[in-house]
Image (cartoon, rainbow, N blue to C red):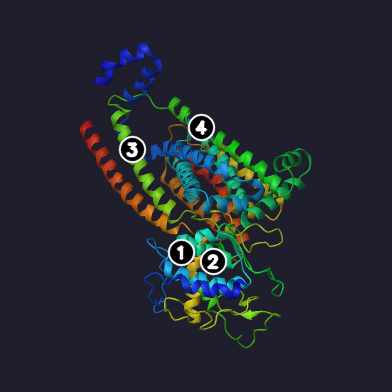
């Protein structure tokens, strides 16, 4: 049921806001990266749409709840709608379909996958890294060749295709764009406090930077008086 | 001046205040002490900070669902992620401070009489810190911690006699929920004993402090200003790490929930355990590894007596050079744990050999030679 409803619901997500098409591919950029980075909410919302309609077919994100989606700019009603479409409530974790066996490998939970593997860029590289196996590489049964995956062979088949979803904000839903959006979404699920961390950190650094200067200056002044 | 006028008043009503004021206001200290003299103070501050943040984490931590409860703290507890980041960064800072403190004690040879007792307490501080740090890393319930615990508890259970009995009592069996519940208790207990060791270091440093020189200054305001400046610099570094690299030097394997059927590829020890892990990894036999750890602690304890230069002997440049080589050696020993180098075990053996060679051969010979 959710597989059919999710894209429809996600379509309505951005309809209310001042949504406009984005291109984060040329050049490839993730707003969440860098010391002052913040989660790109529009990209993360699109990523959530891709997650719900594609990734959640096999993967779960059990550490994330539907209520958490409000942090991405969804209204409580929209989040509740997403939860209802998946047959849950606001407090339900984002579950995937029943776990299936992919050639001996179980699809991992994606909640913290960005922290578990090698970061946002790696997720993008992995999702866009599927290619025909070069000559001399014999694939294991049920495996696909992937340039980013260590060892080159993954049990996950290529999942993203151009136009598999339709973005409400008019962003062109190429496979690469979907990969970039999912990577941003998973960056948020792995570190939902990234924005707060960077913002508080920036202020703390300014505060302690000044405190440091004042403390050192006062120390020098006090000691000068002693001589 | 005002404080001296007030002293009799305070001292007659509350003698402790008089003693406190005497500590801070009497001219007992030589001017111009190094900023590095502040390190024990910073270590105490960090230990107290770790205790406070640890109490908050312990309130929410559940050893039976270790990984999920850490995720719960990070995601669902108000500012839990911040407390977790403080605790992780506090760990990085206290290890950094302790390694620098020990290195400086070796470099300035403050372990020589009458500083032997302070030095032995400092080695004890590192030992307690390593064990507490390892337990904390295991308590996260991540894959790296789980397999580290798996190896350690299996080694402990395989030992015979008294060590085996102690191992069984300590771990209560192989890695599992019950084991983590025990280890949480030991983590807290060791943290408390850490505070005791830090306090003992302070007390013994005070006891052996040189008598006040002719041109002495009081703690207030001179050293208070210096301590405050050091604390401000420390706090600045702390917030940079806490907010921009809260899990600095820890393995991403520890972000994966422990799974008893999937062994992570490669070692996952955090940076502060790396030299000790390198020492353990240098030997293929468990017995030798345990012996090496005990021997490393023993040579560090024995350093005041391995140094043959005497309490007031000259400090030569050659031995100073070897101390820097030792620092590089320990650093390299830690690095052998991380790289995918095929000769890692051999290199770890070489660096371990140099560690013992430095203390058992170079130290007595070079210091005796240079003291003449």
Which one is closest to the eye, mark 4 or mark 1? Answer: 1
State the residue at coordinates (63%, 64%).
B265
Q: Quadrant of the C terminus of chain A?
A: top left
Determine which quarter of the picture holds residue A199: bottom left
Which one is closest to the eye, mark 4 or mark 3? Answer: 3
Which residue is disc 3 drawn over? B228
The chain holding disc 3 is: B
- Residue B118, position in %: x, y? 49, 32
The chain holding disc 2 is: A
Relative side of B219 to B196, left or right = left
Q: Secondary structure at mark 1?
A: loop
Q: Earlier in the sequence, mark 4 or mark 3?
A: 4
Which residue is disc 4 drawn over? B116
Q: Do discs 1 and 3 belong to a common subunit?
A: no
Label 4 Cα crowd, 10 Å radius (few <14 / some 14-19 / many 20+): some
- Residue B43, position in %: x, y? 45, 39
Q: Are marks 3 and 2 in contact (CB under 8 Å)?
A: no
B239 vs B68, nearest the viewer: B68
Label 2 Cα crowd, 10 Å radius (few <14 / some 14-19 / many 20+): many
Q: Secondary structure at mark 3?
A: helix
A157 vs B339, nearest the viewer: A157
Badge number at residue A82 = 2
Which residue is disc 1 drawn over? A74
- Residue B131, position in %: x, y? 60, 43
- Residue B262, placed above or below residue B2: below
Q: Are marks 2 and 1 in contact (CB under 8 Å)?
A: yes
């Amino acid at each position: 049921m959710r597989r059919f409803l999710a894209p429809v619901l996600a379509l309505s997500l951005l309809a209310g806001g001042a949504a406009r098409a984005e291109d984060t591919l040329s050049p490839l950029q993730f707003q969440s990266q860098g010391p002052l980075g913040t989660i790109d909410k529009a990209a993360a919302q699109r990523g959530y749409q891709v997650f719900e309609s594609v990734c959640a077919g096999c993967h779960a994100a059990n550490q994330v709840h539907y209520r958490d989606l409000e942090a991405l700019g969804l209204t409580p009603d929209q989040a509740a709608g997403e939860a209802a479409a998946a047959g849950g409530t606001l407090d339900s974790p984002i579950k995937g379909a029943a776990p299936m066996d992919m050639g001996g490998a179980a699809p991992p939970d994606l909640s913290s996958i960005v922290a578990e593997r090698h970061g946002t860029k790696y997720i993008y590289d992995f999702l866009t890294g599927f290619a025909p196996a070069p000559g001399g590489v014999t694939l294991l049964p049920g495996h696909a060749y992937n340039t980013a995956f260590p060892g080159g062979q993954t049990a996950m088949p290529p999942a993203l295709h151009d136009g598999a979803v339709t973005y409400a904000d008019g962003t062109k839903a190429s496979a690469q764009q979907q990969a970039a959006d999912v990577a941003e979404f998973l960056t948020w699920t792995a570190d939902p406090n990234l924005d707060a961390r960077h913002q508080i950190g920036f202020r703390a650094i300014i505060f302690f930077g000044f405190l440091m200067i004042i403390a050192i200056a006062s120390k020098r002044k006090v000691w000068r008086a002693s001589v | 001046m005002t404080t001296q006028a007030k002293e009799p008043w305070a001292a007659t009503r509350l003698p402790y205040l008089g003693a406190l004021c005497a500590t801070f206001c009497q001219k007992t200290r030589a001017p111009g002490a190094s900023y590095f003299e502040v390190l024990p103070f910073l270590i105490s501050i960090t230990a107290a900070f770790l205790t406070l943040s640890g109490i908050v984490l312990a309130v929410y931590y559940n050893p039976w669902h270790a990984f999920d409860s850490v995720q719960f703290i990070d995601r669902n507890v108000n500012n839990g992620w911040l407390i977790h980041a403080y605790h992780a960064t506090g760990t990085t800072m206290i290890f950094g401070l302790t390694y620098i403190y020990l290195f400086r004690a070796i470099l300035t040879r403050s372990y020589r009489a009458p500083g032997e007792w302070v030095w032995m307490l400092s080695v004890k501080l590192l030992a307690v810190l390593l064990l507490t740090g390892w337990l904390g890393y295991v308590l996260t319930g991540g894959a790296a911690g789980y397999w580290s615990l798996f190896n350690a508890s299996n080694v402990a259970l395989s030992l015979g006699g008294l060590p085996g009995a102690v191992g069984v009592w300590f771990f209560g069996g192989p890695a599992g929920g019950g084991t983590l519940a025990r280890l949480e208790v030991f983590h807290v207990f060791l943290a408390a004993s850490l505070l005791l060791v830090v306090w003992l270091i302070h007390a013994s440093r005070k006891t052996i402090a040189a008598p006040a020189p002719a041109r002495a200054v009081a703690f207030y305001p001179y050293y208070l200003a210096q301590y405050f400046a050091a604390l401000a610099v420390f706090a600045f570094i702390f917030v940079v790490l806490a907010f921009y690299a809260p899990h600095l030097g820890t393995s991403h394997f520890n972000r994966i929930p422990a799974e008893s059927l999937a062994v992570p590829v490669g070692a996952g020890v955090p940076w502060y355990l790396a030299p000790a892990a390198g020492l353990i990894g240098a030997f293929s036999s468990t017995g030798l590894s345990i012996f090496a750890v005990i021997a490393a602690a023993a040579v560090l304890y024995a350093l005041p007596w391995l140094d043959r230069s005497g309490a007031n002997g000259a400090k030569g440049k050659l031995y100073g050079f070897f101390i820097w080589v030792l620092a590089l050696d320990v650093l390299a020993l830690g690095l052998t744990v991380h790289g995918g180098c095929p000769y890692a075990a051999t290199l770890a053996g070489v660096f371990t050999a140099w560690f013992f060679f430095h203390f058992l051969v170079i130290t007595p010979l070079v210091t005796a030679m240079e003291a003449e």
